[in-house]
């Protein structure tokens, strides 16, 4: 009998479905636009069972690392609710430390995306946030590619994400 390797897969959920739930049921709770949600969602992917991300942090849904994460399958509605809470936390950080209420939508969306990914504690004292606070949006957007590492290693996924964030960030600046 041949030696068969057992392959364990994590259940994948649809980012598009979760975005639809968020926009349909929670759009009055967040400011991030569909374009911003798509960058975050597509970069993070969606898994309805817990897994360890490249930074070795227990994660579920669309990049959710907050609160208790139980070893079970999560429903799309649970994932959407968790994600909205995480998006709101990133938005609050941007509003509090990066003049978020005054940022153009595209800049706000890109800034929420990187803050969601990196965390408020690292972003609030960053050069990018300093540029945002002085209204130098182009310089702030150009800081995004610098944030392409996890555990000291450049990750292709982060390089791609930061390029998309930068493009969105600069998209409506004149």
Image: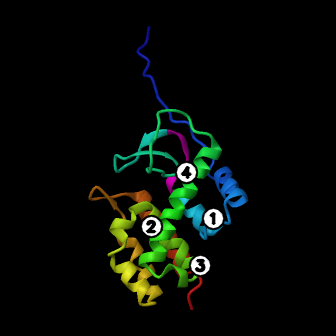
Q: Quadrant of residue 6?
A: top left
Q: Which residue is mark 3?
A: 105
Q: Residues within 10 Å of mark 4 (few under 14, many from 20)?
A: many
Q: Residues within 10 Å of mark 3 (few under 14, many from 20)?
A: many
Query: SS at mark 1?
Result: loop
Q: Quadrant of residue 152?
A: bottom left
N-terminal of the two: label 4 or label 1? Answer: 1
Q: Which residue is mark 2?
A: 114
Disc 2 or disc 4, which is closer to the eye? 4
Is 43 magenta? The answer is yes
Q: Which residue is mark 1?
A: 29
For the residues labelled 2 and 1, the Cα–Cα distance comes to 19 Å
For the residues labelled 3 and 4, the Cα–Cα distance comes to 23 Å
Q: Residue at x 58, y 47 (%)?
A: 79
Extent of the magenta region: 42-49
For the residues labelled 2 and 4, the Cα–Cα distance comes to 18 Å
Residue 131, given in percent of the width and then of the height, sits at 39, 85
- Quadrant containing the N terminus is top left
Q: Residues within 10 Å of mark 2 (few under 14, many from 20)?
A: many
Q: Which residue is mark 4?
A: 82
N-terminal of the two: label 3 or label 2? Answer: 3
Q: Residue at x 33, y 76 (%)?
A: 126
For the residues labelled 4 and 1, the Cα–Cα distance comes to 13 Å
Q: Is residue 163 visible?
A: no
> In the rendered structure, are the residues bearing label 3 and label 4 in contact, judged by CB atoms less than 8 Å apart?
no
Disc 3 or disc 4, which is closer to the eye? 4
> In the rendered structure, are the residues bearing label 2 and label 1 in contact, judged by CB atoms less than 8 Å apart?
no
Q: Is residue 128 above or below residue 92?
A: below
Residue 106, given in percent of the width and then of the height, sits at 57, 77
Q: Residue at x 62, y 40 (%)?
A: 75
> In the rendered structure, are the residues bearing label 3 and label 2 in contact, judged by CB atoms less than 8 Å apart?
no
């Amino acid at each position: 009998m041949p030696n068969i390797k057992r392959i364990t897969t994590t259940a994948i959920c649809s980012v598009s479905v979760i975005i639809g739930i968020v926009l349909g049921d929670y759009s009055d709770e967040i400011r991030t636009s569909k374009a911003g949600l798509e960058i975050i969602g597509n970069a993070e992917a969606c898994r309805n069972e817990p897994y360890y991300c490249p930074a070795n942090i227990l994660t579920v849904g669309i990049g959710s690392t907050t609160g208790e994460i139980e070893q079970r399958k999560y429903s799309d509605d649970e994932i959407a609710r968790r994600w909205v809470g995480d998006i709101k936390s990133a938005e609050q950080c941007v509003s509090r430390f990066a003049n978020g209420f005054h940022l153009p939508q595209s800049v706000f969306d890109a800034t929420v995306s990187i803050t969601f990914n990196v965390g408020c504690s690292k972003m609030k004292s960053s050069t990018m946030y300093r540029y945002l606070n002085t209204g130098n949006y182009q310089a702030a957007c150009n800081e995004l590619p610098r944030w392409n590492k996890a555990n000291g290693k450049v990750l292709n996924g982060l390089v791609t994400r930061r390029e998309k964030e930068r493009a969105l960030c600069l998209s409506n600046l004149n």
